[in-house]
Image: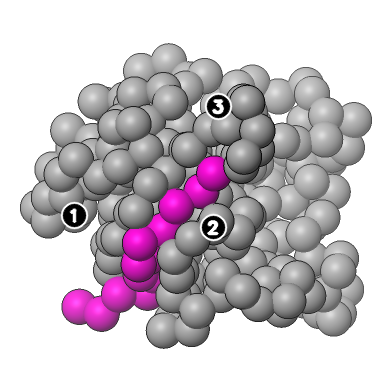
Amino acid sequence: MDAVIRTEGVSKVFNAGLADEVRAVTGVSIEIRRGQITVLKGPSGSGKTTLLGLIGCMARPTEGKILVEGRDVAKLPERFLTSVRRQTFGFIFQQFNLIRGMTVRENVMLPLYPTDIDGRQMVRRMEEILEKLELSSKRGVKVGKLSGGQQQRVAIARALINEPAVLLADEPTAHLDTKLSEDLLNIITTLNMDGKTIVIATHDPLIYDKPYIDNIIEMRDGTVREASLL
């Protein structure tokens, strides 16, 4: 199985050369294999969220290479990096990052507006995703009126609207109870069976102890302590 993402000696330093310099990630070399579920496991401050952002082209490394489909994206001009990010990745953020005053429909379709996709295709995609995630009846409801579990599903729908190959999730169960967390994991495994490559940054054993996790990369102090292909 080939690697959709590979990092080579990647480091990320914030405030380099200053008194408050922070080395968040140091010399990380990993592979994310196509069609698998990979977990970046570690406590708060281990560097897993920073690494997830680097993998997803949300930030640039201070050192090293990030290869997406074999292409080194670390030094691409911003306009090309934005294109790679939009076409390849869908993001599920820990805080959801939904616009509470907008409807479910509006939040889900928002990532499509910078693209050249026509209006009919936008609506078709949105309707298909909402039906898949059992949100069709909520399309006109403002997200601020939804439950936490429903908001999580809206965040997933928004992450899927650009039909990304790779889904990245940062602590997706952090604000959910056990039942809602299990519901979320059921959705994630279904997406994986549909062909999505999934990377999850978490310290939640409810996720990384699951038998369907393919690869666990354990991080501490910004470095990889252990990588296990299960």
| Residue drawn at 16 percent across, 50 percent down | 227
The single residue placed furthest to the bottom in the displayed view is 70
Type of secondary structure dominating the magenta stretch: strand
**Is the Cβ of the residue at disc 1 closer than 8 Å to that at disc 2?**
no
Q: CA distance from mark 1 to mark 2?
A: 26 Å
Residue 120 location, quadrant: bottom right
Q: Which mark is residue 61?
A: 2
Tell me which amino acid carries mark 3. Answer: Gly
Q: CA distance from mark 2 to mark 3?
A: 33 Å
Q: What element does badge 2 sit on?
A: loop
The single residue placed furthest to the top in the displayed view is 177
Tell me which amino acid carries mark 2. Answer: Pro
Name the residue tied to disc 1.
214
User: What range is drawn magenta here?
Assistant: 1-13
- 169 vs 73: above or below: above
Name the residue tied to disc 3.
149
Q: Between residues 45 and 172, which one lies in front from this camera angle?
A: 45
Q: Earlier in the sequence, mark 1 or mark 2?
A: 2
Q: Earlier in the sequence, mark 2 or mark 3?
A: 2
| Residue drawn at 74 percent across, 51 percent down | 108
